[in-house]
Image: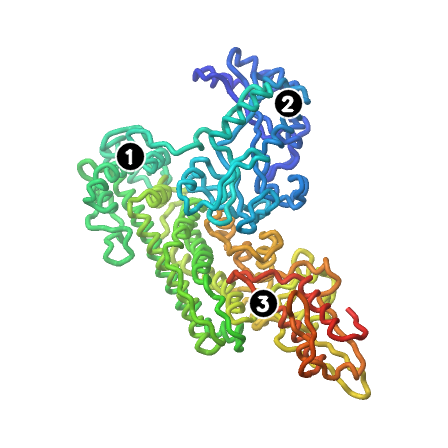
Amino acid sequence: MAKNIANFVIDHGLDGVDIDWEYPGAPDIPGIPPASKDDGSNYLNFLVILKNLLGSKSLSIAAPASYWYLKGFPIAQISNIVDYIVFMAYDLHGQWDYGAKSSQEGCPTGNCLRSHVNLTETVSALSMVTKAGVPSNKVVVGVSSYARSFAMAEAGCYTENCFFTGSSSVSNAEPGVCTNTAGYISNAEINEIMGNSSRVTTSYVDESSHSNILVYDGTQWAAYMDDTTKSERVAFYKGLEMGGGTLWASDLSKYNSAPYPSSSWTTFRSNVRIGTDPYAEGSRTGNWTTLTCDDPSVTNLANLTSKERWDQMDCPNAWADAMNVWFNIDKPANSLTFTESISNTLHAPEMADCGDYKATSNCIQTSTCVSIIGNHSGPAAYAIWNSMIVVHEMYITYINALHDAFSDVINPALQNLENTFAPVSPPKSDEWLGILLSIIGLVGTVAGSAFFNSSNKALYDNLKDTTKGLVSFGTGLTGTLAKPGSVSAGDWTVQDQAVFSQYMGQSIFAWANLTQVALRNLFNGDQDGLTALTNLISDGKFIEGAVNGAGNYPPTGSGLDNSYAALEASVATSFFAFTIPALWKFSSTYAFVLDSGASCGTTDPLSTYMSSAVMTASGYCFNNNWYYLVYPHEYPSSSCSNTPETPARCDNYMFDAVPGIKSLDGSFGGVTLADLIVGAVNTYVSNGNSNTGTVANPANSGTLDQLYNQNITTPGYITIPDCGDSRSSTRLAPRRRRSTTVCKSWPTSRIRWASGRWKTPSSNSISWCSMAPANLASRVKELMVTSTSTLAPRTLSISSIRRSASLLRTASSGPWEK
């Protein structure tokens, strides 16, 4: 390897080479086995050989500012070999800190908002490497042109002791429009955000870390270095007699115009993707116009793969020529639509509009080679045109399948759904705003993944990236739909059930409409649509070809029939998994997942608060812990006995299984009790053991990966509140065993919540035994109702319930037991 590197540097007249191995001897890099302890010495030997082969050319390495990873480098010996060391004094903090108790000073949870370019920590790291024996003038200190960003746990709390959300592997930060990576955003994107004052909450230089801080879009936080900060840092490092500064990375600093002759970066990038020289000029390039329909690339379907046929027909150049005509001639002149322009350049059928959903689009029939080829055209034209036809056909089939899925699966089950999971009239509630847009984004993403993935399995490859491109392109357009208007609150009546049916049913049609918008945008000739379309059709993904001796066919016919079945099953599962909790919420059931804190070997761990039958019906053991899907009673499930023969015992259970618990056996789209409990717990854990998070965002790459795999337990999909961890408390609430005289009447108003505790003045009288648990259950509901989030009520913590119950003791005296 050393010889190959040295030859490459010398043959191409380069100044030298920088080696970045991350990291020799590292024991814990995610996704790879622990490294060998011999890595460090082997690395040193390799560098010695490479330096000798390079002669006068320079050799440098990159080294981390982390003791944990730097210790694998024989850094002092390496410094004697290389010309300098690039010291990566950035990425000191990031999303990976979450849960690492030693990653942040003064923040044992590891999820405090800390700058990844903190100066104090950088100086400590520089001291570490120089004390290890590296001459300071050989240390070139890195500065950055990007930020590490986080989603703030609380709007308005953005100092170093405030928290961010997500997990060590999932960031809830907004991806940049260019970098498209949650938790990582370039200075160019930051400058664009700063230029829109409506997005900026605050921006300032944090003196303690010598970092620029930007808070934007309400809860987005980013730490970075602007040009002034970078200049000050480099000057500071030179004052420490370091070797200087180095920038990662120059292409992140600002937006630049596309190189001539490309009219835009979209054209430039598309040309690069399809293998065409982006600097080439001319209306026709390559040899695609010289080929005929007798060419082997047209006739030899049995022996050439789809990509081989695509390349041999010179489709990359044909597509690039068609785009150049569109961007440089037809679009500026506003004379033709995008489909018309492509058709005109390729000599394809006329009067077509592949972005139109209607049957009059004339984008519904594939063509033969001989029907298209002519002057200044070639076989590539029919391959490109047919690819566009197949993409259009997939979208139309998907839209029709959505409507059929609603008619065949969802609509017949809606009435039974409501009667099963919301059978009674609870108090008034208007907390159903936001449900529609959420279900469009989430259910649509799962359903779309099922359909397009099933369609593309007919091709020579599973094409996961292509499928995800189709899904994410549609998901990103959710915001184009108008938000639904609020609906008046009222009792949960038969009429309300009808409204809910209509409301939730509209989500399927909304996703179908959104897919029509996605189809139109895919073929409108704008930058985003052109990028997506280029990725879809490149390499001949939608033309026929040979695969291991068998034919490869585009997703038509039986392939799309199988997609229909996959879509119906996926729509049912994803729709009901989202709708059932929403229905409980909307009908004021206030369902929540109760964490018992008891291991799976424990029998009936919460017998004080639920009957054995309820625990059997509502319980599921996950991660060796019993969880129960329950809701608080409006009234106690039983009253205490009061006979002369038997002292009264008040076994009034506070919680019951949610309505419809018996139907969580797969009856509704395969959704089970286990799905809802696991999904709720995953959401709770992902939000830092809190119920204050938002609904899952399909635009997040990690979330999309899970939704793509039909995972309805993806964090944020099921938002039933999780009632903390009861292991931190002795019990949920007390229950009372008293003599017969205790069950006599006492003041009603003695159970009144005010100023953070139960108040007990005197007033009318009722039975304590029937009143205390009922009011406690009502208090539980009160805690859940007072929420600012439609789908994620406030945390129903064990301590809140226990405190509410224990304060009841002030209402009367007597013996108690837990």
The mark lying in front, picked from 3 and 2, is 3
| Callout 3 crowding tier (Cα within 10 Å): few <14, some 14–19, many ≥20 | many
For the residue pair 717 and 750, the one nearer the viewer reads as: 750
User: Mark on residue 591?
Assistant: 3
For the residue pair 223 and 613, the one nearer the viewer reads as: 223
- Identified at 45% across, 28% down, the residue is 250
Give the structural element (helix, strand or loop) at label 2: helix
Query: Does residue 61 appear in the picture of this structure?
Result: no
Compare marks 3 and 2 and give the one earlier in the sequence: 2
Give the alpha-carbon distance from disc 3 to disc 1, as whole Å: 56 Å
The mark lying in front, picked from 2 and 1, is 1
Give the structural element (helix, strand or loop) at label 1: loop
Q: Which kind of residue does numbered mark 3 sit on? A: Ala
- Identified at 52% across, 77% down, the residue is 425
Give the side of residue 727 with respect to residue 136, left or right. Answer: right
Query: Does residue 94 appear in the picture of this structure?
Result: yes
Give the structural element (helix, strand or loop) at label 3: loop
User: Mark on residue 263?
Assistant: 1
Which residue is tagged 2?
42
| Quadrant in the picture for residue 529 | top left
